[in-house]
């Protein structure tokens, strides 16, 4: 964006602070209207910054908490091939969290601060990760439905108005596509396996279907942030639009899988050119958001434990970085006091 940077705001402005603010806002609004990207050093309204931090932090937290349900099956994967794929997928989710925490840092919030808020229960992560993985087929259902829903939601975020978030999403979406395919392929194998395997696949789809629809957030008329986020082009589509798009994608895929979706009200709506679907249990969604889902407590406890147990790794990395920057010939060395030698 060829906008005024934060540093320039105080330089050479003849008018009042209010006039300068209004000029910046006009430049920002014009950039958003023109589909330009807002970059970290560009002026932006504080509410825009706060909304981005809220969404990006929640997204980053979802990626790292989202490692837990599937990691539960790494040691019990049925073959070496499935184990290698699952390990790679879970590692990818950690990577996504790191891209997103880094992108959030460009808005002036440290990773440490965001993690502290997650651990204190002051920031959210996606409701979907508060459900248990009861059988191996759940790994397939998560790949197909949870990663599928994530892609449907996140592809439009590649066109988000904030540059670092949009660019992080490009890479994340490529990896999520692989995750979705592996889940689909896993379910296809189970669905066409023994009757017991088919039943296990169907049971997993039955349990994950409705929580996956909840990933898109509350219905549009109850979505507090959608209108403003869409005006700022952080979000490009409403929660209900994306949810319906996801149903349209899943219906033919379920047919190929030979599995049914647990909703007798799914039917083609000729007028809309899309599928209708049954009522979502929004009470269950609100309960999960309040912390009363089946695994909320387990997920946060495990996350806090992993953070505490990883303290030595962070300390070691910081000590190494300090040592490295103190070496002669490195950029950091110039700033170090030189000890006199005898
Ligand atoms: C669509 C929405 C999630 C919500 O729209 P907004 O406009 O932001 O909010 P809206 O006004 O509609 O809602 C009002 C309140 O309700 C909250 N809330 C809503 N829905 C949920 C929910 N489902 N869970 C929990 N909370 C939810 C919402 O934050 C707000 O609360 P607040 O006022 O902040 O306290 C949006 O933030 C978004 O697109 N995020 C980016 C994508 C992203 O985060 N993806 C995560 C999955 S990544 C993944 O799966 C990859 C993976 C796969 C496999 C394994 C591992 C990893």
Image (cartoon, grey):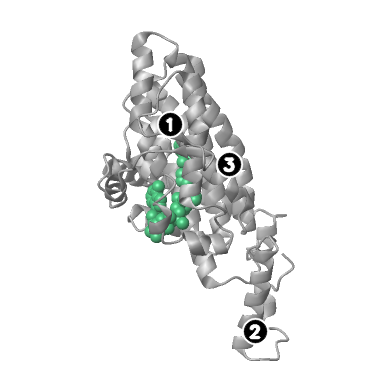
Picture coordinates of residue 309, whole percent (x, y): 37, 43
Q: Residue at x 56, y 72 (%)?
A: 45
- Measured in 3D between alpha carbons, the distance from the residue under mark 1 to the one under mark 3, in whole angstroms, is 16 Å
Note whether ligand 1 is within 8 Å of mark 1.
Answer: yes
Give the label, 1 or 3, closer to the camera: 1
The residue singled out by tag 3 in the image is 172
- Taking the image as shown, residue 289 lies to the left or right of residue 87, namely left
Evaluate if marks 2 and 1 touch, with contact meaning CB atoms under 8 Å apart. Answer: no
The residue singled out by tag 2 in the image is 20
Q: Which mark is residue 142?
A: 1
Picture coordinates of residue 154, whole percent (x, y): 55, 45
Picture coordinates of residue 302, whole percent (x, y): 33, 41
Q: Residues within 10 Å of mark 1 (few under 14, many from 20)?
A: many
Instruction: Report the quarter where the C terminus lies.
Output: bottom right
Note whether ligand 1 is within 8 Å of mark 2.
Answer: no
Element assignment for label 1: helix
Element assignment for label 3: helix
121 lies above or below 303:
below
Q: Residue at x 54, y 57 (%)?
A: 104
Q: Nearer the viewer, residue 216 or 177?
A: 216
Instruction: Report the quarter where the N terminus lies.
Output: bottom right
Element assignment for label 2: helix
Would residue 315 be seen by someone viewing this image from the given angle?
no
Q: Residue at x 64, y 57 (%)?
A: 163
Q: Residue furthest front?
A: 271
Marks 2 and 1, the one that precedes in the sequence = 2
Marks 1 and 3, the one that precedes in the sequence = 1
Q: Residues within 10 Å of mark 3 (few under 14, many from 20)?
A: many
Quarter location, residue 69: top left
């Amino acid at each position: 964006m060829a906008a005024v940077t934060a540093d320039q705001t105080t330089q050479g402005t003849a008018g009042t602070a209010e006039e300068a603010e209004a000029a910046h806002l006009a430049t920002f609004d014009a950039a958003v209207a023109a589909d330009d990207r807002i970059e970290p050093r560009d002026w932006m309204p504080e509410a825009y910054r706060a909304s981005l931090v809220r969404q990006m932090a929640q997204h980053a937290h979802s990626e790292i908490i989202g490692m837990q349900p599937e990691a539960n099956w790494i040691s019990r994967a049925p073959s070496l091939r499935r184990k290698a794929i699952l390990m790679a997928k879970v590692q990818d989710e950690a990577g996504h969290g790191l891209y997103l925490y880094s992108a959030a840092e460009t808005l002036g919030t440290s990773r440490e601060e965001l993690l502290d808020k997650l651990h204190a229960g002051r920031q959210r992560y996606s409701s979907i990760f508060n459900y248990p993985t009861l059988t191996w087929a759940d790994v397939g259902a998560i790949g197909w439905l949870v990663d599928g829903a994530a892609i449907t939601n996140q592809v439009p975020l590649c066109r988000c108005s904030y540059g670092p978030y949009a660019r992080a999403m490009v890479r994340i979406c490529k990896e999520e596509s692989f995750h979705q395919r592996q889940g689909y392929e896993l379910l296809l194998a189970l669905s066409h396996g023994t009757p017991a395997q088919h039943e296990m696949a169907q049971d997993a789809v039955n349990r994950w279907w409705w929580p996956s629809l909840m990933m898109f957030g509350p219905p549009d008329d109850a979505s507090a942030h959608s209108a403003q986020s869409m005006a700022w082009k952080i979000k490009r589509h409403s929660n209900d639009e994306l949810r319906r798009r996801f149903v349209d994608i899943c219906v033919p895929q379920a047919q190929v899988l030979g599995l049914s979706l647990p909703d007798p009200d799914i039917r083609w709506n000729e007028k809309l050119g899309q599928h209708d679907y049954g009522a979502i249990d929004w009470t269950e969604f609100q309960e999960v958001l309040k912390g009363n889902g089946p695994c909320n407590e387990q997920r946060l406890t495990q996350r806090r434990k992993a953070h505490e147990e990883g303290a030595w790794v962070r300390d070691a990395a910081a000590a190494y970085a300090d040592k490295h920057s103190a070496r002669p010939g490195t950029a950091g060395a110039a700033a170090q006091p030189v000890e006199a030698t005898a």
